[in-house]
C-alpha cells in the first residue's frame, strides 16, 4: 500500500506542476501533506516536516549566502572578462550560444557545487538568450545536463556517497568511469549543437554589435543576477511564442531587442557597482573560497556565510550600499530558500512514512532472477528514475547497498555496481528534490514545469549514453 501511495504521490506532484495546475511550492507542501493523511499518519506530519526542514536547513543557508556572494561578485565585475570572452565566441549566433552554455556550465562545474555553476552560467548567458528571444528552457536544460555529468567528480557528492556506502575508494570508482563520462559530456555538447541549430533556424543570426546595442535611456538598469523586484515569472515557453514570428529573419537589430520591462541590460560596463581596483582581491577571495570548499576546511554554509560577509564589507563599506546589494538579490534568495523548505516537506513525508523504503524494496524485489549476473546494468538503469525521485542520500545509502549485495551474490563486484550508480546524475540534477535546480529556474525566470517537460527526455538519453559507453568500454 505504501509503495502504491509513494509512486502515486510523486506522479501527482509531477503532473500538477507540469500542467501548471499548482505552483511548485504549493505542490511540494500540500500534496505530501494530503498523502500523509491518506497513509493514516497525519498526526505525525509535524514531526516529518521538522525532520525534513532540519536536514535541509544547512542546504538552504548555503544557497542563501551563495546567491548573495556570487551576486556581489557579478555586481563588482569579477566575471565580466569571462562573459566578454563568451560573447566573442558566440558572436550572437544561437548555435554558438547554446554550445557555449554547455561548455561554460561544464567548466564551472569543476568546483563541485551545482548552485555556483547555475548562478554563474545563467548570469553570463541570460542577457543573450533574452536579447535574441531564444528559448530559456534550452539554456536551463543544457546547463543542468552538463552539470549532471560533471557532478560525478569525487568532490561533487555522488561518488563520495557511493564510496562511503560500499566502503570503497572514491578514486577506484571515478577514474575508470572517466571515458564513459567523457562520452556523456560529448553527448551533451552534440545535443547542444543540435538544439543550437534548431534555434538558429528559428531565429537567424545577428551581429554582436546588434545584440549589444544600447537600450533606450529610460529603460530600467538591473544587474545580471539581481532581482528585478517585479516578480516576473515569464517562462521559456512564453519566450518561444513571442519569437515565433521572427523565424529566419533575425537580421533586424531593433526587432530583436527585449521589451523595456524585461529589466536587463546585460553586463553594463559602466554600472556603479563595479570595483576594478578590487578585482584581484575578489578573484583571490573566490579562489580561496572554492579551494576551501573542495578541501572541506569548513562546512560549505559557513564558508559562504563568511565569504558573503567579507565580500560585502570590503566592496561596499557603507551600510546603505550593503543594504542595496542585499535588496537587489533578495528576490532570488527568497525564491530559492522558500523552495528548499517546501521540498523539505516532500522529502520529510516521503521518508518519514516509509514510502521510500517500500518503493525501493518493491523495485529490488521485482528484479528477475535471470538478471542477477547483470546487476551492474540493472543498477545503472534503476539509478536513472530512482535518483530523480529521491535524494542522493536516500539512493546511495538506502538502495545501493541492497543492489550491491544482490550483485555480489551473482559474482558482480561492488566497484561495478558503484560505477553504474553514477549513471543517473544527468537526470538527477533536474529533480524537484535538488535545491540547486531552483536556483537555475529561478534566475532564468523559467517555470519549473516547463523545464521539467523539456529536460527529462534529453537528460534520460544522456544517462543512457553514459551507461552504454560504460558497458562498451567494459567499465560497467
Image (tube, rainbow, N blue to C red):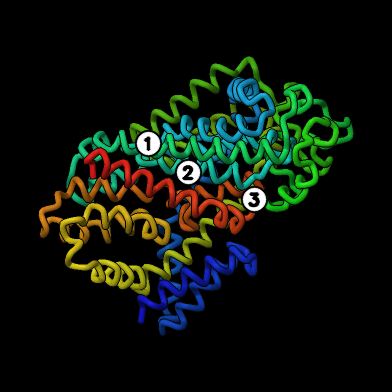
Q: From the viewer's perspective, is the residue at label 3 or at label 1 nearer? A: 1
Closest to the observer, 138 or 326: 138
N-terminal of the pair, mark 3 or mark 1, is 1
Residue at the spot of label 1: 183
Q: Which mark is residue 145?
A: 2
On the question of residue 58 being in view, the answer is no
Q: For residue 70, which quarter of the picture?
A: top right
Badge 3: residue crowd in 10 Å (few <14, some 14–19, many ≥20)? many
Residue 133 located left or right of residue 41 = right
Residue 65 located left or right of residue 247 = left
Q: Residue at x 61, y 55 (%)?
A: 450
Closest to the observer, 151 or 380: 380
Q: Are marks 1 and 2 in contact (CB under 8 Å)?
A: no
Residue 323 located left or right of residue 437 = right
Vertical side of 362 occupied by 90: above or below: above
Q: Which mark is residue 446?
A: 3
Q: Residue at x 37, y 40 (%)?
A: 156
Q: From the viewer's perspective, is the residue at label 1 or at label 2 nearer? A: 1
N-terminal of the pair, mark 1 or mark 2, is 2
Q: For residue 263, which quarter of the picture?
A: top right
Q: Give percent across and percent down for residue 347.
A: 43, 64
Q: Residue at x 58, y 69 (%)?
A: 16
Q: Give percent across and percent down for residue 316.
A: 65, 28
Amino acid at each position: 500500500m505504501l509503495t502504491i501511495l509513494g509512486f502515486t504521490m510523486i506522479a501527482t506532484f509531477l503532473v500538477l506542476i507540469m500542467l501548471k495546475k499548482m505552483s511548485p511550492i504549493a505542490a511540494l507542501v500540500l500534496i505530501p501533506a494530503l498523502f500523509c493523511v491518506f497513509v493514516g499518519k497525519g498526526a505525525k506530519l509535524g514531526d516529518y516536516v521538522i525532520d525534513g526542514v532540519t536536514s535541509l536547513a544547512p542546504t538552504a543557508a548555503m544557497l542563501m549566502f551563495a546567491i548573495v556572494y556570487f551576486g556581489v561578485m557579478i555586481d563588482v565585475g569579477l566575471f565580466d572578462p569571462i562573459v566578454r570572452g563568451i560573447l566573442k565566441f558566440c558572436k550572437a549566433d544561437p548555435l554558438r550560444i547554446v554550445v557555449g552554455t554547455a561548455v561554460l556550465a561544464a567548466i564551472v562545474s569543476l568546483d563541485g557545487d551545482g548552485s555556483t555553476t547555475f548562478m554563474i552560467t545563467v548570469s553570463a548567458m541570460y542577457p543573450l538568450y533574452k536579447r535574441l528571444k531564444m528559448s530559456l528552457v534550452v539554456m536551463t536544460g543544457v546547463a543542468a545536463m552538463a552539470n549532471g555529468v560533471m557532478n560525478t567528480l569525487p568532490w561533487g557528492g555522488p561518488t563520495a556517497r557511493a564510496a562511503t556506502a560500499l566502503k570503497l575508494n572514491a578514486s577506484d570508482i571515478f577514474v575508470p568511469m572517466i571515458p564513459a563520462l567523457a562520452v556523456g559530456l560529448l553527448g551533451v555538447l552534440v545535443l547542444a549543437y543540435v538544439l543550437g541549430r534548431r534555434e538558429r533556424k528559428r531565429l537567424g543570426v545577428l551581429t554582436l554589435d546588434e545584440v549589444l546595442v544600447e537600450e533606450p535611456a529610460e529603460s530600467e538598469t538591473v544587474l545580471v543576477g539581481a532581482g528585478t523586484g517585479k516578480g516576473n515569472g515569464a517562462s521559456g515557453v512564453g519566450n518561444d511564442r513571442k519569437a515565433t514570428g521572427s523565424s529566419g529573419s533575425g537580421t533586424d537589430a531593433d526587432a530583436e531587442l527585449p521589451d523595456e520591462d524585461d529589466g536587463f541590460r546585460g553586463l553594463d560596463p559602466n554600472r556603479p557597482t563595479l570595483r576594478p581596483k578590487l578585482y584581484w582581491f575578489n578573484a583571490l577571495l573566490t579562489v580561496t573560497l572554492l579551494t576551501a570548499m573542495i578541501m572541506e576546511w569548513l562546512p560549505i554554509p559557513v564558508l559562504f556565510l563568511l565569504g558573503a560577509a567579507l565580500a560585502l564589507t570590503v566592496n561596499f563599506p557603507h551600510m546603505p550600499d550593503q543594504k542595496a546589494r542585499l535588496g537587489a538579490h533578495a528576490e532570488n534568495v527568497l525564491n530559492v530558500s522558500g523552495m528548499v523548505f517546501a521540498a523539505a516537506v516532500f522529502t520529510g513525508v516521503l521518508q518519514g512514512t516509509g514510502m521510500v523504503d517500500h518503493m525501493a524494496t518493491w523495485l529490488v524485489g521485482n528484479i528477475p532472477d535471470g538478471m542477477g549476473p547483470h546487476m551492474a546494468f540493472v543498477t545503472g538503469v534503476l539509478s536513472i528514475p530512482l535518483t530523480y525521485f529521491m535524494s542522493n542520500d536516500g539512493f546511495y545509502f538506502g538502495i545501493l547497498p541492497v543492489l550491491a549485495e544482490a550483485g555480489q551474490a551473482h559474482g558482480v563486484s561492488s566497484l561495478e555496481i558503484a560505477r553504474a550508480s553514477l549513471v543517473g546524475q544527468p537526470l538527477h540534477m533536474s529533480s524537484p528534490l535538488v535545491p540547486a535546480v531552483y536556483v537555475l529556474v529561478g534566475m532564468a525566470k523559467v517555470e519549473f514545469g516547463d523545464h521539467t517537460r523539456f529536460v527529462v527526455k534529453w537528460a534520460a538519453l544522456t544517462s543512457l549514453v553514459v551507461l552504454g559507453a560504460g558497458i562498451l568500454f567494459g567499465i560497467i
